[in-house]
Amino acid sequence: MILKDAKIKIVNVSGSPHGAIGNTQSLVKKFVEALEKKGAQPELVNHFIVKEHVEECRGCTRCMRKGSCVMSGKDEVDQIVSDLLAADFVIYSSPIYVLNVTSLMKKFFDRTAFMTHRIVLEHKLGIYVLSSQGLGIDNVSSYMKSVMEAEGVNVLGHIEGTAIFHNQFLNQEEIDKNIEEIITAMETESYKEEEGYSESEKKRREKFASLMDQEDISKKLFHEDYKYWAQRKEKE
Ligand SMILES: Cc1cc2nc3c(=O)[nH]c(=O)nc-3n(C[C@H](O)[C@H](O)[C@H](O)COP(=O)(O)O)c2cc1C
């Protein structure tokens, strides 16, 4: 991808309770500024879950059975998903809270669980951004990557900031390196060479596809998912 003059619509879904003024968002801004320095024209659309009306998942599995959510139209999740579908680049960003993403971020993931069943964001480019005080990064990092890949995103990298004071990071050099690596991946399109997805995601997808092959289970339990996978198989 040639970054100079490239118009890039970036949709950032943030689970930070501090929204626009938090440590997490300052890392997102650093990335966008780095793109601008390269001559790109990023358009950043932020969805701060803390500020938006996002209901909890009701656990009814209607999205998997019928393809629509029981809460559809009653909150702002449809708009977020529609923005994600229109995005050139997806960012999921969250502080680490008690060795995990925040409950705000998880609430969004639960509400959009169908995106992992039907690979709704297939081949979109994206990254995840985490800020913390340095505890629990490995597990959360691996979790974020798995969620994004399960939704179909080609994860080009991540930014992890260890914040001690407000918007001040102990690992500034590492953050700059993280950003540089993401930009290099965008410029060289190296994600295509590696077929985009990790080995663990490829295995997860195979398992999911074979579950969908068991019609007695999948037709009954996850009818909409079953239809998606049947059509996908036909095309292959
Ligand atoms: C309730 C709570 C739990 C936290 N748990 C962790 C943790 O498990 N590991 C860690 O490194 N930092 C933890 N932190 C620190 C935050 O991740 C850190 O301050 C982060 O930079 C905040 O980002 P924000 O300004 O975008 O909200 C926690 C903070 C809070 C308030």
Image (spheres, grey):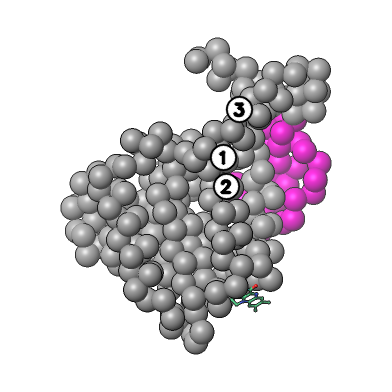
Residue 142 percent location from the top left of the image: 57, 54
Q: In the rendered image, which quarter is residue 16 located in?
A: bottom right
Q: Is residue 51 visible?
A: no
Asked if residue 69 lies in the magenta stretch, the reply is yes
Q: Cβ of disc 3 within 8 Å of ligand 1?
A: no
Image position of 138 with respect to 6: above or below: below
Residue depicted at 59% across the width and 33% down the height: 203
User: 147 or 227, which is in the foreground?
Assistant: 147
Give the residue type that dot 1 points to.
Ser
Q: What's the mark number on residue 206?
A: 3
Give the residue type that dot 2 points to.
Ser
Q: CA distance from mark 2 to mark 3?
A: 15 Å
Are there few (<14), some (14-19), or many (20+) residues within 10 Å of tag 2? many
**Quadrant of picture, ligand 1:** bottom right
Q: CA distance from mark 1 to mark 3?
A: 10 Å
Residue depicted at 45% across the width and 47% down the height: 155
Question: What's the magenta region?
Answer: 50-79
> Which callout, 1 or 3, points at the residue further toward the start of the chain?
1
SS class of the residue under badge 2? Answer: helix
Q: What's the mark number on residue 146?
A: 2
Q: Which residue is mark 1?
A: 200
> Which callout, 2 or 3, points at the residue further toward the start of the chain?
2
